[in-house]
Amino acid sequence: MSELRSWTAEWADFEHRHSGFAIAEPIYNLPKEAIHVLAGSWGSRAAVLDATRARSEREFADLCNRHKVVGVWHGRMVRYDYLLSDQPPIGAGQVPPGYESHVRALAAAADRLAATRYRLRGVAGWLLTEPKFLQELAAVRQKWEALPSSGRPPFPLTRAYRVESPPPGAAPADATTASYATAFHDLMDRWA
């Protein structure tokens, strides 16, 4: 809970200092290299980001990196581990004497993990260019937006847990909620 409170306080402070930064859509942080390029003028091309916006983007990236998130939506953290930067491997100087073999094993595992993460990032990129996926995603989004704001599942969306029997006091979902839940789970099943 302390991480959540820390995010909430830091996000409120950021939002206060950079009013207008957040909009209704999810906002993802930019890599520092991209901010540098967008804030610079190259040849006859003017800077895309002015100095104020570039500073806001850098501070937003720092905030997201501190909390290991990729962005924000309606003040909530957006987590997607495959878009986070790979962590540097543990160095030999960071372990007690006699554990050097562990460092080598961790480095080998980190290399295999980095290759897997690279491929999974590619899948996310492919989905963002796949017309059928985008069409189905838009249909699910419409169903989500049709829900009353108090009944919308928070972002990032996850699968609902299926239970053998409903908890005491539970009521069946209304038709709009059931339609959304079915469409969402079908999308998740179809596109993994």
Image (cartoon, rainbow, N blue to C red):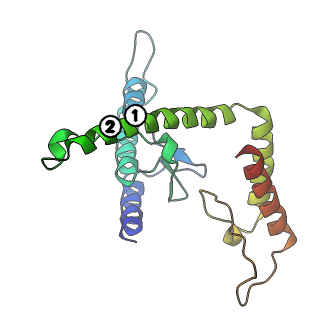
Mark 2 vs 1: CB contact within 8 A: yes
Question: Can you give x and y, in whole percent of width and height, for residue 39 in the image?
Answer: 39, 27
| Front one among 43 and 186 | 186
Q: Residue at x 36, y 70 (%)?
A: 2
* Circle 1 Cα neighbour tier, 10 Å, few/some/many (<14 / 14–19 / ≥20): few
Question: Can you give x and y, in whole percent of width and height, for residue 43 in the image?
Answer: 40, 9
Seen in the picture, residue 5 relative to 137 is either above or below; the reply is: below
* Circle 2 Cα neighbour tier, 10 Å, few/some/many (<14 / 14–19 / ≥20): some
Q: Residue furthest bottom?
A: 168
| Front one among 172 and 35 | 172
Q: Residue at x 71, y 90 (%)?
A: 168
Seen in the picture, residue 51 relative to 148 is either above or below; the reply is: above
Q: Residue at x 79, y 83 (%)?
A: 171
When asked about the image quadrant of residue 150, the answer is bottom right
Specify whether 103 is left or right of 141: left
Question: Can you give x and y, in whole percent of width and height, for residue 88 in the image?
Answer: 31, 38
Question: Can you give x and y, in whole percent of width and height, for residue 32 in the image?
Answer: 37, 33
Disc number for residue 107 = 2
Q: Is residue 142 visible?
A: no
Q: Residue at x 42, y 56 (%)?
A: 15
| Residue ID for mark 1 | 111
| Front one among 50 and 94 | 94
For the N terminus, the image quarter is bottom left
Disc 1 is placed on an element classified as helix
| Front one among 11 and 124 | 124
**Looking at the picture, which amino acid does disc 1 mark?**
Asp
How far is the residue under mark 2 from the one under mark 1?
A: 6 Å
